[in-house]
Image (spheres, grey):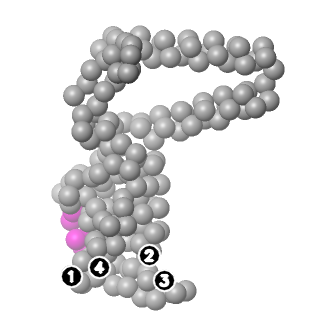
C-alpha cells in the first residue's frame, strides 16, 4: 500500500504492514526460510557465535534486518540437531561451525533462491543501505552546524533542508 499525504499527521509515504513498501523496515522480518538460509550462508563464510551471527546479518543488510536472538539461537540449535552445524567452546562462548552437509545445503538453498537473502533484498529494494547511509551523513552534518555553526550557517542550512524536503515531495508526487 502506498499513499502520499501532503499535510497533517499523515505526511510522506505510508507503507503496508511490512514497513517499507513490500520490504524490510529497521529490525524487520524476512520470510520464514530466509533465517535458515542466512545463518547457513554466514556459517559457510566463517564460524561464529549467536551474537556474531546477528551482527553480521545486520551488517550484510546495511542495518535493514537485525534478527532477534529468539530467531537466531533456535535456528543454530536446529542446524546442530540436524547435523548441518556443530558447536565448539571457544573463549567461553559457544561457536558454531558449518559441516560438509551444511555447506551443501547452504549452496543448494542459495542457488535455488538465486542468491543469499541479503543479495535478494538488495536487488528488490535497490540501494536501501546507501539511502540509509546518506540520511545518517546528512544528520551528522546538520548536527555539526547545530553545535558549532554561526547564526548565518544555521539559517543557510535550514534553507537547504527546506529545499531538499520540497524536492523529495515533488519527486514523490510525480509517481
Q: Which residue is mark 4?
A: 77
Question: Decide: marks 2, 1 in contact (CB < 8 A)?
Answer: no
Mark 1 highlights which residue? 82
Q: Earlier in the sequence, mark 2 or mark 1?
A: 2
Secondary element under disc 4, as helix, strand or loop, is helix
The residue range painted magenta reads 104-111
Q: Residue 4's spot in the image, x, y percent?
A: 31, 17
The image quadrant where one finds the C terminus is top left
Q: Contact (CB < 8 A) between labels 2 and 3?
A: yes
In the picture, residue 99 is in which quadrant?
A: bottom left
Where is residue 130 drawn, in percent x and y?
A: 48, 37
Quarter of the image for residue 70 reads bottom left
Q: Taking 35 as reference, is 133 left or right?
A: right
Q: Which of 47 and 51 lies nearest the eye of the viewer?
A: 51
Look at discs 1 and 4 and give the one toward the viewer.
4
Q: Residue at x 81, y 20 (%)?
A: 150
Q: Which mark is residue 93?
A: 3
- Which residue does the image show at 36% across and 42% down from the upper left? 25
Cα distance in 3D space between marks 4 and 2? 11 Å
Amino acid at each position: 500500500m502506498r499513499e502520499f499525504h501532503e499535510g497533517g499527521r499523515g505526511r510522506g509515504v505510508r507503507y503496508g504492514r511490512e514497513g517499507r513498501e513490500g520490504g524490510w523496515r529497521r529490525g524487520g522480518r524476512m520470510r520464514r526460510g530466509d533465517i535458515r538460509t542466512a545463518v547457513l550462508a554466514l556459517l559457510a563464510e566463517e564460524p561464529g557465535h549467536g551474537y556474531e551471527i546477528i551482527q553480521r546479518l545486520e551488517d550484510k543488510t546495511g542495518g535493514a534486518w537485525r534478527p532477534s536472538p529468539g530467531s537466531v539461537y533456535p535456528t543454530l540449535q536446529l542446524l546442530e540437531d540436524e547435523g548441518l552445524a556443530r558447536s565448539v567452546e571457544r573463549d567461553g562462548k559457544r561457536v558454531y561451525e558449518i559441516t560438509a552437509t551444511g555447506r551443501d545445503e547452504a549452496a543448494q538453498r542459495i542457488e535455488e533462491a538465486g542468491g543469499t537473502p541479503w543479495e535478494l533484498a538488495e536487488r528488490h529494494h535497490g540501494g536501501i543501505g546507501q539511502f540509509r547511509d546518506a540520511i545518517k551523513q546528512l544528520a551528522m552534518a546538520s548536527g555539526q552546524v547545530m553545535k558549532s555553526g554561526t547564526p548565518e550557517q544555521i539559517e543557510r542550512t535550514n534553507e537547504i533542508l527546506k529545499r531538499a524536503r520540497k524536492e523529495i515531495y515533488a519527486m514523490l508526487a510525480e509517481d
